[in-house]
Amino acid sequence: MFDNLSDKLDKALHVLKGHGQITEINVAETTKEVRRALLDADVNFKIAKEFTNSVREKALGQNVLTALKPGQLMVKIVKDELTELMGGDSEGINLSGQPTVILMSGLQGSGKTTFSGKLANYLKKKKSKNPLLVACDVYRPAAIDQLHIVGEQIGVDVFSDKENSDPVSLAKAGVQHARENGFNTVIIDTAGRLAVDEQMMTEIANIRDAVSPEETLFVVDAMTGQDAVNTAKAFNDVLNFDGVILTKLDGDTRGGAAISIKSVVNKPIKFIGTGEKMDAIDVFYPERMAERILGMGDVVSLVERAQEQYDEEEARRIQKKIAKNRFGFDDFLKQIQQIKKMGNMKDLMGMIPGAGKALKGLDIPDDAFKHVEAIIHSMTPEERADPAKLNASRKKRIAKGSGRSIQEVNQLLKQFNQMSKMMKMMQGGGGKKMMQMMQNMR
């Protein structure tokens, strides 16, 4: 996410991170490079110019030239300005209606139908809502079927009527169905087009007028850069929507849309899509995104994801096993499954401060644990419960069964033993010693 922009901003700010003399000239040079990085990311020229002018004024106004750590102060100024440019504070979704009606809009191919499902899943799990998906795309082949498949994946009902070709009456019927059947949230998936046209705008405006939604959301593909911003402006002129959804942020996006869309349409980015899975949806936090762009990571989001997968009962069970030195590969496998549920590995690594730069150029596939799982699944239940029983002949059989080398089996065993010792240490007096050391460092 934003790898290229992060790299260029880091290089632009590098001159002020060293120990050389800081002057007004190299502050100006730095802001010039920052502007170039933003333009390369497909940020609008006017916005990039205003941004860097503001950074330069604040840098000189806060005496960066005479600060003890001018580089760090400059990074903070850039971070604060990026945060403000992307909206300042995160904005939640309005769920006050009875039922709450959410109207989804956007171009074809933006990921609108998939995101309708993600949003329904989010509201069901995180907000304890009972959502209904309404299929109002009567033009795209198999659009209704796609929404039904999405609904089945997440356990959410879908209202549709293939005999009805009028999106406005379909939307009204869907809302009425929700009222009569106890659904407290309605998400209306509308038709997209390949380009902005008058017929499309008129149709979705008519749907909005007919159902009076609490939220009208514009879904846009972040990979389209400045085109996404221009499309958002065209939709907003007609719909006056309430917020923006940025999809495909896990792809090769330059970041221009995320950075400049709020400034152009004056509407907040409310959610982002970060993958193909139905739980790959995040609330958009401008400050957290600014920190990630500048390579500072996003520890808060990482902790939140970990807490979502945290099972207190399972944790107690694991603690007892560690205390009795009975932590085995079945337990290890469960820990892997929890990590996988947190999201794709590349996205998770980007949340760790400094990890993005350290792992630059490395391909971290979503199935990074695949070979580890294959090795563990090739063990017998007895071997998984007691790894000490793995002698040379057993390792050879496991390697053959998993399609991996004996060296990889040995490497996994070594890592498992090291992790077990560390967990045992944290369980006992070692954990107290580490806490005392951390307190002494304050």
Image: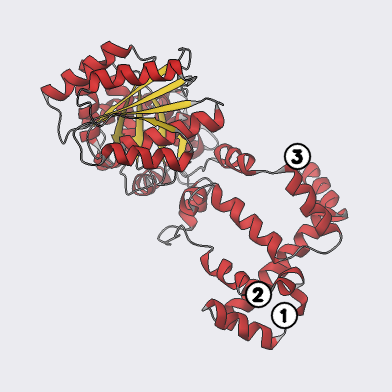
* Tag 3: amino acid: Arg
Judge depth for marks 1 and 3 and give the one in front.
1
SS for callout 1: loop
* Tag 1: amino acid: Leu
Instruction: Please report whichever mark, 2 or 1, sits nearer to the chain's N-terminal start.
Output: 2
Circle on res. 390: 1
Label 2–label 1 contact, CB within 8 A: yes
Q: Residue tagged by mark 2?
A: 379
Is 383 left or right of 402, judged from the image as shown? Answer: right
Is 235 left or right of 28, judged from the image as shown? Answer: left
SS for callout 3: loop
Q: Is residue 266 visible in this depiction of the protein?
A: no
Instruction: Please report whichever mark, 1 or 3, sits nearer to the chain's N-terminal start.
Output: 1
347 lies above or below 264: below
* Tag 2: amino acid: Met
266 lies above or below 42: above
Q: Identify the residue shown where x is 42% and y is 61%.
A: 363
Location of residue 247 (image quadrant) = top left
Location of residue 384 (image quadrant) = bottom right
Circle on res. 442: 3
Q: Is residue 437 visible in this depiction of the protein?
A: yes
SS for callout 2: loop
426 lies above or below 311: below
Q: Residues within 10 Å of mark 2 (few under 14, many from 20)?
A: many
